[in-house]
Image (spheres, rainbow, N blue to C red):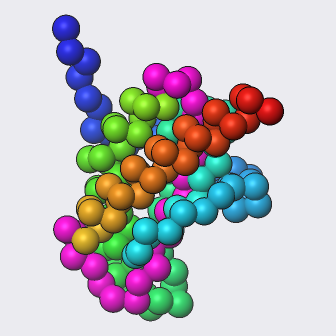
């Protein structure tokens, strides 16, 4: 029997804790796939995969523009996260990711979707490599 893919991005899948966000930026590692930058921390306490998104006020002055970009980022993450989540579950790993939008222009959904897919692929490789290196030390 096949396992059903969950496309939800619920409360447990989002990073809300200011303490955890500070820890991600202090101890985490970064990967950039323009126009996205992901800072990830290989260990989190609550869920297999957690995410937070951000858009700089310096680059997008209007709140409506920032909210639109964040909405696009969350939607593209929601539809593609199952690949990373399944890999983490198989390897019994956990990951927290903070994604920041870097471009000054308003993006098209397709561009954000492609960049998110590449970011997820890169995170999957890096997170699994990091966890293997920590096990061997």
The residue closer to the viewer here, 13 or 121, is 121
The residue at the point 34 percent across, 38 percent down is: 83
81 left or right, relative to 114: right
Residue 69 locus on image (x, y percent): 34, 73
Left or right of residue 107, residue 70 in this image: right
For residue 50, say whether it is visible: no
The magenta region covers 89-110
Instruction: Give the residue furthest to the right.
Output: 137
Q: Is residue 95 magenta?
A: yes
Above or below, 105 relative to 51: below
Where's residue 77, x and y in %? 35, 52
Please indicate, yes or no, whether residue 104 appears anywhere in the rendered image.
yes
- What residue lies at 72% left-to-right and 29% top-to-bottom? 135
Figure quadrant of the C terminus: top right
The answer to which quarter of the image holds residue 107 is: bottom left
Which one is nearer the viewer's eye here, 15 or 131? 131
Q: Residue 82 occupies which quadrant of the picture?
A: top left
**Image quadrant in which the N terminus is located:** top left
**As drawn, 96 above or below 26:** above
* x 30%, y 47%: residue: 80
What x and y, as percent, mark residue 43?
Answer: 66, 38
Number of numbered tags placed on the structure image = 0
Q: Which residue is drawn at 41% across and 58% down?
A: 119
Given the current orientation, which residue lies at the most extreme front position?
A: 136
* Residue 136 x, y percent position in the rendering: 74, 29
Q: Which residue lies furthest to the top in this view?
A: 1
As for residue 68 lying within the magenta part, the answer is no
């Amino acid at each position: 029997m096949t396992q059903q893919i969950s496309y939800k991005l619920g409360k447990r899948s989002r990073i809300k804790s200011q303490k955890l966000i500070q820890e991600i930026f202090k101890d985490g590692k970064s990967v950039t796939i323009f126009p996205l930058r992901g800072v990830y921390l290989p260990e989190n306490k609550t869920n297999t995969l957690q995410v937070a998104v951000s858009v700089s006020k310096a680059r997008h002055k209007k709140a409506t523009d920032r909210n639109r970009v964040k909405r696009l980022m969350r939607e593209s993450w929601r539809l593609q996260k199952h690949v990373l989540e399944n890999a983490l579950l198989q390897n019994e790993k956990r990951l927290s990711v903070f994604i920041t939008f870097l471009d000054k222009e308003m993006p098209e959904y397709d561009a954000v979707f492609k960049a998110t897919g590449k970011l997820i692929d890169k995170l999957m490789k890096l997170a699994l490599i990091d966890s293997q290196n920590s096990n061997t030390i």
